[in-house]
Amino acid sequence: MSKFILAIDQGTTGTTVSIINSVGLPVAKGNHEFSQIFPNPGWVEHNPNEIWETVLKGIRRALDQASISGEQIAAIGITNQRETTLVWDRKTGEPIYNAIVWQCRRTTDVCQKLKKEGHQKTVKQKTGLVLDPYFSATKFHWILANTPKAMKRAEAGELAGGNIDTFLVWRLTGGKKHYTDVSNASRTSLMDLKTQKWDKKLLKLFKVPEALLPEIGPSAGHIAVTNGVPGLPDGVPITGIAGDQQAALFGQTAFKVGEAKCTFGTGSFLLMNTGKELVRSRSGLLTTVAWQLEGQPVSFALEGGAFICGAAVQWLRDGLKIIKHSSDVEKLARSVEECGGVQFVPALTGLGAPYWEPEARGLITGLTRGATQAHIARATLEAMALQNVDILISMQKDLKKKMRALKVDGGAVANDLLMQMQSDFLGVKVQRPQVIETTAAGAAYLAGIGVGMWTLDDLKKIVQVEREFQPNMTKKQREIRLHEWHRAIRQTTSF
């Protein structure tokens, strides 16, 4: 019997393909970056064909590193950058426009118009989401409205659309399966959380033809099989799919109600498992689907996300050029004991939860003649942690209880200084697992569940804590720092 899971983690800046063995540990991976396209200020796009090429390269590299053949793959799991939206021709499989990335703010005016018309309450009630260009619905409409004849072709069933998971399933199956899992569907603003079906009123509101959209199904189970994929035999089952943040929650084995994680990626995202209960946020958070295992009820989650997290460090590297490598930021930040009054609010693509201010812009304040690159670097790390505090405070208000620990993952959690800051500002312990790439692990675990390789109890035994960070800051110090942060936040917005 085949003993390996192939996990495709299609992220915002690159694709990582991992090989996971039968005891749930990674044995190989292939990572490839792709181009970031910025046609106008606030616009972000990806070339779908370039994304697909990184998937194929990743598969080849991962199989070579693991010294195994495609025949030894028991199942495939997929996790993806959520909300990123694309449309393609059903006959040729070719995209009719670039993928519009979750960070893109081009539909801000549309969202503002819908808010003024009073649709915010309906959208929030049905989808658990706010009216914001972050989500997929207005992106679908923009592509259809701005590509010649696209709307008519979509209505006629000639075009297929979806988020990145749907596109990858389409390509992996040679165009035989048009599918999305319920976690990704919950990020479109087009699915009713209660029914887990495309909602006709929302489709009409956002002007998206239902004929464009994929079938919605579970996150783990028999979904499809491969067809015509270089390096893989036909018939390999695809048995796990989840949006990247839901996959990370699953990868942290946060299966119990109240367990939570924060992923430090391009953005940072806090999710808390609320189980079968659909918790409505009154504090600026989102209600979303966590996952659904085949034959079982949907599990829900509360979510809050900051659009810019690790991307702020990339900006220090590529924009300001004060570091050569992203990993250099910790050493530079440690060279000073505090920020020296410097504040950085990384609202480079607007503010996410709990503020939802798409027009907010980044801000560096408190500069003096004594300010250095090190102060800016430290202020960047502090901002990455502080924006998560705002989300957690909102989460605790909604749940009416305090979190005891925060599980963390993503590349940036290797930064010990950042993790200590997070613990200090939150006032709770922060737990870093042995395997920090839990997004890919979550996709693999879902696929393993779907193919019958593991049970939930098996997965609980696999995931172990590597280090726990305890808060060292006093309550008074924490209050002062949060006050300074919120004062800086107010300067970026009109609220």
Image (cartoon, grey):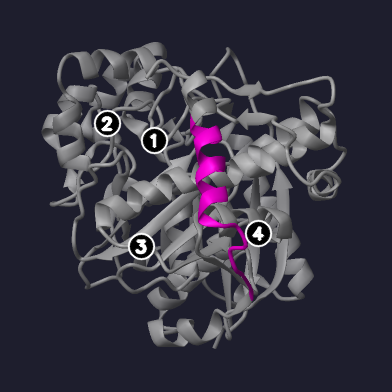
Q: Residue at x 85, y 49 (%)?
A: 331
Distance in Å between CA atoms under marks 2 and 4: 52 Å
Q: Are marks 4 and 1 in contact (CB under 8 Å)?
A: no
Instruction: Assess disc 4: are there few (<14), some (14-19) or many (≥20) residues with their C-alpha within 10 Å of its C-alpha.
Output: many
Q: Is residue 27 visible?
A: yes
Viewer-side label of 1, 3: 3
Q: Secondary structure at mark 1?
A: loop
Q: Amino acid at mark 1?
A: Arg
> Disc 1 designates what residue?
90
Q: Amino acid at mark 3?
A: Lys
Instruction: Assess disc 3: are there few (<14), some (14-19) or many (≥20) residues with their C-alpha within 10 Å of its C-alpha.
Output: few
Question: Mark 4 or 1 closer to N-term?
Answer: 1
Q: Are marks 2 and 1 in contact (CB under 8 Å)?
A: yes
Q: Tell me which segment is drawn in magenta.
A: 467-486
Q: Residue at x 84, y 29 (%)?
A: 372
Q: Residue at x 35, y 27 (%)?
A: 132
**Is 350 or 463 nearer to us in this picture?**
350
Distance in Å between CA atoms under marks 2 and 1: 8 Å
Q: Are marks 2 and 4 in contact (CB under 8 Å)?
A: no
Q: Secondary structure at mark 3?
A: loop
> Disc 3 designates what residue?
402
**Horizontal relation, residue 143 to residue 59: left or right:** left
Tell me the quarter of the picture where residue 452 sits: bottom left
> Disc 2 designates what residue?
157
Q: Which mark is residue 420?
A: 4
Question: Mark 1 or 3 closer to N-term?
Answer: 1
Is 476 magenta? The answer is yes
